[in-house]
Amino acid sequence: MNHVLKKIAVCMVIGLSLNVAGARNMAAEFQGSGNQTTDEFTVKAPWILDWRINSDYNKMVSFDLDLVDGTSGVLEGNILRAKALGNGVRMFNTSGKYRFRINASFIRWHLKVIELTAEEAELYTPKTPR
C-alpha cells in the first residue's frame, strides 16, 4: 500500500510541475476549428505540445496535425492523426521556428506549446491519446 501512495505522490508532483511550467513557459497557444495553418512560433527544446480536440459530434470526426518549418513551410512530420475526440501531450527535443498545419473535420482544437526545463523533461512520461 505504501508503494502505491508513493506513486500517487510522484504523479501529483509531476503534474504540478508541468502546470507551473505551463504558466511560466508558454511559448504559444492556438485554438480554432476546421483547417488552418497557425502563425509561426519559436520554441527552445525541450518542449511539449499539450493538445485537446472536442466536437459536438461523436462520429465522422477527423483530425490531422502536422509540424512544419516556420520559415520554409517544409513538413517536419505528422504529430497526430485521430478519428476520435481526446487529448494528450507529446514532447519534442528540437528547437526552432515552427507552425502547425491542421486538417480538422467537425472538430474544435486547442494547442499549447510549453517549454520545459531539463528536470521537467526527465519527469515526462508519454501519454497515450484517449
Image (cartoon, helix red, strand yellow):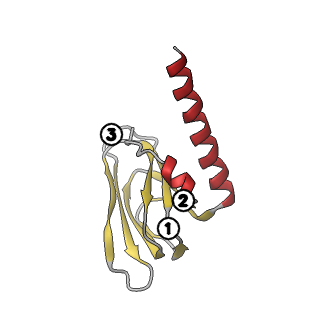
Q: Is residue 13 left or right of residue 66?
A: right
Residue type marked 1: Ala
Q: Nearer the viewer, residue 127 or 3?
A: 3
Going from N to C along the chain, the mark reached first, 1 or 3, is 1
Label 3 element class: loop
Circle 3 packing at 10 Å, graded few (<14), some (14-19), many (20+), is: few
Marks 2 and 3 close (CB-CB < 8 Å):
no
Going from N to C along the chain, the mark reached first, 2 or 1, is 1
Name the residue: 38% across, 74% down: 68
Going from N to C along the chain, the mark reached first, 2 or 3, is 3
Residue at mark 3: 59
Residue 67 position within the rendered picture, expressed as x and y whole percent measured from the top left = 38, 68
Q: Is residue 102 left or right of residue 25?
A: left
User: 101 above or below 122?
Assistant: below
Residue at mark 1: 45
- Residue 79 occupies quadrant: bottom left
Name the residue: 38% across, 57% down: 104
Label 2 element class: helix
Label 1 element class: loop
Q: Is residue 93 left or right of residue 62?
A: right
User: 86 above or below 93?
Assistant: above
**Discs 2/3, front:** 2
Residue type marked 3: Lys
Query: How far is mark 2 from mark 3, CA to CA?
Result: 40 Å
Query: Residue placed farthest to the front in the image?
Result: 2
Residue at mark 2: 118
Query: How far is mark 1 from mark 3, CA to CA?
Result: 36 Å
Is residue 109 among the parts visible in the rendering?
Answer: no
Is residue 125 among the parts visible in the rendering?
Answer: yes
Q: Nearer the viewer, residue 10 or 78?
A: 10
Give the number of the disc on residue 70.
Answer: none
